[in-house]
Image: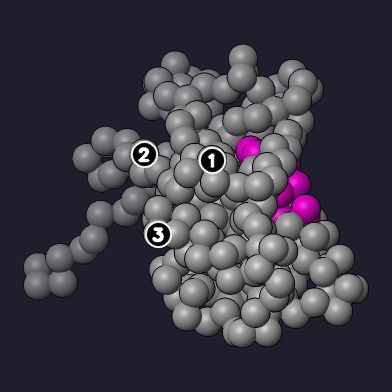
Amino acid sequence: MGNLHNGQVEVVCGSMFSGKTEELMRRLKRAQYAKQKIQVFKPVIDQRYSTDHVQSHDANRILSTPVTTAIEILEKVEDNTRVVGIDEAQFFDETLVDVAQKLAYRGTRVICAGLDMDFRGQPFGPMPKLLAIAEQVTKLSAVCMVCGEPATRSQRLVGEVEPSGATTEDQVLVGAHDYYEARCRFCHEPNTITSFQTGLFPKSKLIQKTPEKNETA
């Protein structure tokens, strides 16, 4: 347990491709240079690049522990850990807020990185409450892939098409460049069903689900 007065919550947020994970790793590496023990966690759902590393889109990475729930973070943090990093914080439920608070009151520095908005431009998971209770908030922007202005939104480029032809739009669809791109407020199209219908995205961008064969037939 560290000095109680050193405990705090920091949140790094922004759209896809804004450098959130890079900033998280930069802060963690600085803590390592200062000979502070760190532990890094990420949701088990994020297996885009590695199952046991936090990795940025630029292929920089740091060893991490995948967890299914936020409570597991509290259980796995060791007594001599000074800094806890949590990537893809938006994928946890609101229990993460309580976990971050408890760690901070123990004297642990907690750094959370995640999307503040989903692909519709709506608040994502526990992020709004994390932003509210944090001592330090950093909001990063990317570059809009349409007009080149600063981007604060994540545009989903694909949808899941059921055999019936219906399009589903779950809030969570883990992916990178093939699934998303950064957009500014004015170029962002939050209703991807409308976008597909109006032909803004080619049909090749849709993920077609093949009907399961009836093995008893």
Q: Nearer the viewer, residue 211 or 135?
A: 135
Residue stretch rendered in magenta on the structure: 14-23
Indicate the quadrant containing the C terminus: top left, top right, bottom left or bottom right: bottom left
Q: Which residue is drawn at 75% across and 80% down?
A: 37
Q: How far apart are marks 2 and 1 (CA)?
A: 28 Å
213 left or right of 67?
A: left
Q: Nearer the viewer, residue 74 or 212?
A: 74
Q: Is residue 68 visible?
A: no
User: Which residue reaches farthest left?
Assistant: 217
Badge number at residue 122: none
Name the residue beneath numbered marker 1: 132
Residue 191, position in %: x, y?
42, 24
Q: Work out whether 160 lies above or below 197.
A: below
Q: Is residue 101 visible?
A: yes
User: Which residue reaches farthest right?
Assistant: 33
The amino acid sitting under disc 3 is: Thr
Instruction: Mark 2 and mark 1 in contact? Answer it, CB < 8 Å.
Output: no
Identify the secondary structure beneath mark 3. helix
Q: Which of 111 and 142 is in front in this view?
A: 111
Q: How crowded is mark 3: few (under 14 residues within 10 Å), some or many (20 or more)?
A: few
The amino acid sitting under disc 2 is: Glu
Identify the secondary structure beneath mark 2. loop
Badge number at residue 95: 3
Q: Work out whether 120 lies above or below 56.
A: above
